[in-house]
Image (cartoon, grey):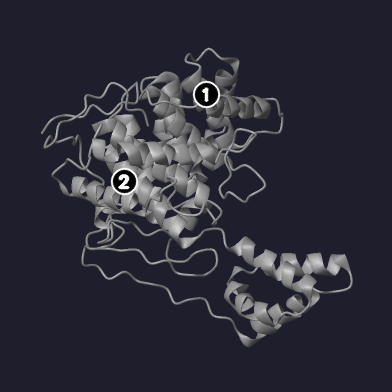
């Protein structure tokens, strides 16, 4: 999100434009955080949310294992230490295909004596552990806060959305550590969480120029940049061997917005990111959606002008793949909306085609029903949506609306005094 050209509001001024995303505001916790996760994670665990609308949320019973399930797991645990490597590989894959086995396997782990079997069982558990709970909540809270800011609300606003921003900003700054991070980047999902937190605090500071958030924003941004890999991309978790296209896109988005807000950036960060984009553009098999979107965003953001063959080629590829949008989640819609708007504005043919599908696939699917906790929200469609939960997906959908309606053409919120 770009905040260039915004006149900084003075203390006491109202910065709202348009209605707030009420579903997001309603689901903020009393401590200023939003809870990550959906009713049931891939591991079969329930990550609770918070709802202050007086509606009792229905929580599904946890997954249970039958005696036959336990015997099935035990046989494969024994095979983890088998004589043949094929047998050990087979047992690992079998266990990894049964997420509900995680809790039982965790209890079995201390009793596994064979070193090979123990190592493989630990590896299987790591595959289940795709998110640390604190990282999940940090990701979701930052995304929700950014969604409210993108609609024009800040800690200075007097409405409930402004109060929500104020409380979440306080929660983030209280959680921030001396080195600018909010948790260990090596915990599952820790780098993406850092990127999201940096995004939220920087957006708030760039919009308001409030001295209160200057240092937290700068330190969060510096910590995010320090987590960049040597190849120019970002991993989702610091200990991951491979780059993560989604995390890299969001980090690129923060850097582009920083440049547009005239924030100081180390040249090495943008140079390495550009090198990663160029290396991916030379790979004929590199057709990952977020890799293409990152290439477009970085090229337009750091090398202004849409005449680049890389940008035009990427836009043509994305346009030809719009039929895939039925399975897109909040992150995909936000990233596509951001890039399509930057490429040809709200009146361009690419953006019009995208937004027509957005209305058909997302807006038309909005839940409506009086007295229902989910009323006003949008369904989760992607794997990341299901991992991080409905607040995450709805926050990114709300931010996509902001890009289309509050930031026509240039992607700028025009904050108004109250």
Q: Residues within 10 Å of mark 2 (few under 14, many from 20)?
A: many
Q: Residue at x 34, y 21 (%)?
A: 409
Please provide percent x and percent y for residue 413.
27, 29
Instruction: Residue 15: tell me if it is visible.
Output: yes
- Which of the image's four quarters has the C terminus? top left
Quadrant for residue 284, please give it. Answer: top right
Instruction: Residue 359: tell me if it is visible.
Output: no
Q: Residue at x 25, y 36 (%)?
A: 211
Please provide percent x and percent y for residue 320.
57, 29
Please provide percent x and percent y for residue 113.
75, 80
The residue that mark 2 highlights is: 145
Q: Earlier in the sequence, mark 1 or mark 2?
A: 2
Question: Under tag 1, what secondary structure?
Answer: helix
Instruction: Judge whether 206 appears above or below 344 on screen.
Output: below
The residue that mark 1 highlights is: 267
Instruction: Judge whether 79 appears above or below 28 on screen.
Output: below
| Number of numbered callouts drawn | 2
- Give the left or right position of residue 354, taking residue 244 as reference: left
Question: Under tag 2, what secondary structure?
Answer: helix
């Amino acid at each position: 999100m770009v905040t260039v050209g915004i006149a900084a509001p003075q203390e006491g001024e109202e910065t709202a434009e348009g209605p707030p995303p009420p579903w997001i505001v309603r689901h903020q916790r009393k401590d200023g955080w939003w809870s990550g996760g959906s009713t049931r994670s891939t591991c079969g665990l329930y990550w609770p949310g918070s709802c202050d609308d007086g509606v009792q949320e229905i929580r599904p019973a946890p997954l249970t294992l039958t005696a036959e399930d336990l015997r099935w797991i035990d046989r494969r645990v024994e095979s983890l230490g088998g004589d043949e490597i094929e047998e050990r590989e087979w047992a690992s894959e079998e266990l990894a295909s049964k997420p509900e086995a995680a809790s039982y396997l965790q209890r079995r782990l201390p009793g596994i004596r064979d070193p090979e079997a123990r190592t493989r069982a630990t590896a299987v558990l790591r595959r289940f552990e795709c998110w640390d709970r604190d990282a999940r909540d940090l990701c979701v809270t930052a995304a929700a806060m950014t969604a409210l800011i993108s609609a024009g609300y800040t800690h200075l606003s007097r409405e409930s959305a402004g109060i929500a921003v104020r409380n979440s900003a306080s929660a983030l700054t209280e959680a921030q550590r001396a080195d600018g991070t909010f948790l260990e980047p090596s915990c599952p999902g820790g780098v993406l969480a850092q990127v999201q937190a940096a995004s939220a605090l920087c957006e708030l500071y760039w919009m308001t120029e409030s001295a209160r958030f200057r240092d937290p924003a700068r330190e969060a941004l510096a910590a995010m940049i320090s987590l960049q890999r040597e190849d120019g991309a970002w991993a989702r978790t610091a200990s991951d061997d491979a780059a993560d296209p989604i995390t890299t896109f969001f980090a690129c988005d923060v850097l582009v917005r920083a440049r547009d807000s005239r924030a100081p950036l180390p040249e090495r960060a943008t140079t390495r990111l550009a090198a990663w984009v160029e290396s991916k553009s030379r790979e004929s098999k590199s057709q990952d959606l977020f890799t293409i979107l990152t290439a477009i965003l970085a090229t337009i953001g750091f090398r202004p002008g849409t005449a680049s063959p890389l940008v035009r080629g990427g836009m043509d590829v994305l346009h030809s793949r719009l039929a895939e949008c039925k399975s897109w989640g909040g992150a995909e819609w936000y990233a596509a909306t951001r890039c399509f708007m930057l490429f040809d504005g709200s009146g361009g043919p690419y953006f019009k085609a995208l937004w027509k599908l957005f209305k058909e696939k997302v807006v038309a699917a909005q839940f409506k029903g009086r007295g229902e906790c989910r009323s006003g929200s949008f369904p989760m469609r992607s794997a990341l949506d299901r991992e991080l939960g409905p607040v995450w997906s709805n926050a990114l959908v709300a931010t996509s609306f902001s890009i289309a309606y509050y930031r026509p053409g240039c992607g700028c919120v025009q904050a108004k005094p109250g």
